[in-house]
Image (tube, rainbow, N blue to C red):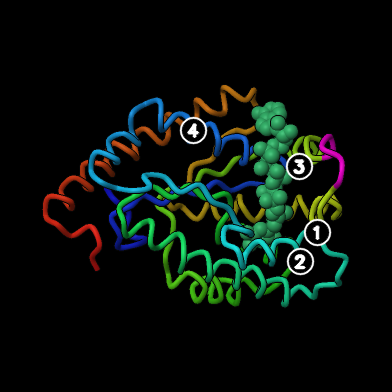
Amino acid sequence: MHSATHPYAGLFIVLEGGEGAGKTTQMGAIATWLEESGWLAKLRASDIDPPLLLTREPGGTPLGQGLRQLLLHSDLEIDPLAELLLYAADRAQHVATCIRPQLQRGGIVLCDRYTASTVAYQGYGRGLDLQIIEHINRIATGGLGADVVLWLDLPVGVGLARTQQRGIADRFEQTAVAFHERVRQGFMALAQQGSDRWQRIDAHQPLDQVSKAIQDCLAAHLHRWFETLKKRLTGGDRDLP
Ligand code: T5A
């Protein structure tokens, strides 16, 4: 069944997880698989252009790139509430100018982090009130939720060790391990809230096994979604409401 988390014809897939979980790596692998397995060709044949939007938070828009620089790579002291609102500003711009238009076109959005990251990092990690976060997430997104959330889960120490091999650490990678343990608890709590849109992927496996688990999960979603999309296109309501 096509999810009721947004009214548009497109498919919204989000990758979530802690530091070094492999999201960026798997985004590329998913894009290649979508091309090679013919899904993007099917969308092009239906005049959906572009068929796939690869994006991320923070930083999926020109405004977001400036915010990302402030949030992750500046020496400025940022109060937790100000941090929350900066992520929300990044998201509001991203949804309005990138995500919603792509879903209205009937295309696929593949996004590295979304609202769950705010719950996990600013809520469980920083300790901000979860109801306030939920409210701000709703304002920033206009209620637009993902159809599929792939949570790449692995032990905190393993993820941080992967990022440390890269050299220079950003603001969050420098934060204490206890913070990242709380973040993982946050993702776990969201996954346990029972939404069938959430799928835990064991990210502590070799790359190709992680990719295979993701593909198995997405294949089922894509088949169901494409059947619905075809009906909508035939009925001419791709852009509605
Ligand atoms: N944030 C974000 C908030 O606090 N609130 C919010 O609302 C939002 C949206 C974003 C930061 O902002 C925070 C969370 C983050 O701290 P970012 O740079 O986008 O910053 O950080 P990450 O999303 O964490 O990106 P990372 O690059 O750190 O992690 P990835 O993308 O999950 O991992 P990836 O693919 O870069 O892989 C890391 C390394 O591991 C290797 C890769 O080759 C790479 O070297 N690797 C593996 N090695 C072995 N086995 C595997 N299976 C591997 N998969 C990847």
Q: CA gap, disc 4 to disc 2?
A: 32 Å
Can I make out residue 59 in this image?
yes
Q: Nearer the viewer, residue 50 or 163?
A: 50
Question: Is the residue marked by circle 1 packed among few (<14), some (14-19), or many (20+) residues within 10 Å?
Answer: few
Q: For residue 41, what is the image quadrant?
A: top left
Q: Which residues are magenta?
A: 164-168
Left-right relation of 167 to 141: right
Q: Mark 1 highlights which residue?
A: 73
Question: Is the residue marked by circle 3 packed among few (<14), some (14-19), or many (20+) residues within 10 Å?
Answer: many
The amino acid beneath tag 1 is: His
Q: CA gap, disc 3 to disc 4?
A: 20 Å
Q: Earlier in the sequence, mark 3 or mark 1?
A: 1
Quarter of the rendered image showing ligand 1: top right
* Secondary structure of residue under mark 1: helix
Q: Quadrant of the C terminus?
A: bottom left
Q: CA gap, disc 2 to disc 1?
A: 6 Å
The amino acid beneath tag 4 is: Ile
Question: Could you say where residue 8 lies in the image, as x and y percent from the top left?
Answer: 30, 60
Would you say the residues marked 2 and 1 are in contact, meaning their CB atoms lie under 8 Å apart? Answer: yes
Q: Mark 3 highlights which residue?
A: 156
Q: Residue at x 45, y 29 (%)?
A: 33
The amino acid beneath tag 3 is: Val
Left-right relation of 85 to 214: right
User: Closer to the camera: disc 3 or disc 1?
Assistant: 1
Q: Residue at x 50, y 25 (%)?
A: 212
Q: Which numbered dot is residue 214?
A: 4
